[in-house]
Amino acid sequence: MWKNYLKISNFLRVKVILFVLLFYLFFGFKGAEALDFFECYNKAKAYDPKYLSVYYEYRASLTFPQQALASLLPQVEFSYLRRNYRFITAPYYYTDYTADTSAINLRQAILNIPNIIEYKQNDIRSDMGEKKLNYATQELIKRVADAYFEVLYYEEALRVIEEEKKAIFEQLKMIKKLFEAGEATLTDVHDVEARYSSIQFRLIEAEKNLYTAKNNLRRIIGEEPIALARLGEEVYFPEPKPSNIDEWIKIAKENSNVVKYYSLAKDIAEYEIKKQTFENLPKIDFVAGYIKTNTLEYLKTASIDYYIFGIQINF
């Protein structure tokens, strides 16, 4: 149960902590030529496929209400038909002629509860797209932060190991001189040589880790991170407020985009049950039409006009 609470509150907590972190990093970074965190984040927003897929899905979701509204608006149809009658074999009094028919029809839903419910569902789907994008933005911040600071960590680790290698190399030169002078044993020399071999292995491992970390960041921002801005020497991280985990759980339940997303999904499911219930009820439409037929060439009469309007009930 405790793990579930942590899972629920994780997203909002990450958002708040990262906001505080980014504020101090903005004033704590050094190195004008280096790529800082905000630049990495902006590049990731423009490149990261995972984020962009959610972003364009959100853009598409904005059209859902308009799509659903179309079924509630008047439906107008217009048609025009022209027929040419040519008699190949017929009595003399049969003459060739042309007939024109024009028609315009209007249908407006008066009572169609399933379509009304569908409109409400699509409005909720649009909100779900926004919540999903907000979560994707938070998740992108976390992924960029993980990759960015992982590179800084392994750069610092590599620098420390290189300094340690220099120190051990100096020890090795010294111990060899002492051995030549008879003031050190062969065991002492072998011990330092073993330490030097070990540090070389650690150096290779650190270089591999740094390469992997840079590659992870490159996959997110879309370019090789040649140089990253480092943290300032003194960066103050204030304690998150509130400090009580129960308060964070309460805030997460009220504001977490994940919780809101699935709450909206629950609303859509409830509307779907109602929509299926009303599918069997009659649907009432107002219908109107106008038809004009012209056969003047054949019947030698004026055009015939038809006007139709009424209420249509569909079961």
Image (cartoon, rainbow, N blue to C red):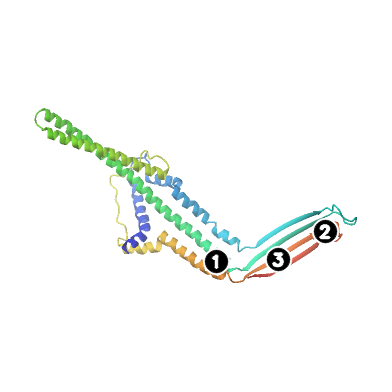
Which residue type carries mark 1?
Ile
Q: Is mark 2 on a helix, strand or loop?
A: loop
Measure the C-alpha gap from mark 1 to mark 3: 25 Å
- Identify the secondary structure beneath mark 1: helix
Residue 88 position, x and y percent, is 85, 52
Q: In this view, does 12 lie above or below 196?
A: below
Q: For residue 297, what is the image quadrant?
A: bottom right
Q: Judge the density around disc 1: few (<14), some (14-19), many (≥20) Cα neighbours within 10 Å.
A: some
For the C terminus, the quadrant is bottom right
Name the residue carrying label 3: 288
Which residue, given by chain and number where applicable, does mark 1 sit on? 117
- How many labels, in total? 3
User: Quarter holding the N terminus?
Assistant: bottom left
Residue 26 visible to an observer of this rendering: no
Amino acid type for the residue under numbered disc 2: Thr
Residue type at tag 3: Ala
Q: Is residue 308 visible?
A: yes
Q: In this view, does 291 lie to the left or right of 244?
A: right
- Which residue corresponds to the image point at 33% horizontal and 60% vertical from the top-left? 6
Q: Is residue 157 left or right of residue 63?
A: left
Identify which residue, 4 or 234, lies in the foreground. 4
The earlier-in-sequence mark between 1 and 2 is 1
Q: Please name whichever residue, 252 or 5, is drawn nearer the observer in this view of the structure.
A: 5
Nearest to the observer: residue 201 or residue 254: 201
Q: Mark 2 points at which residue?
A: 295
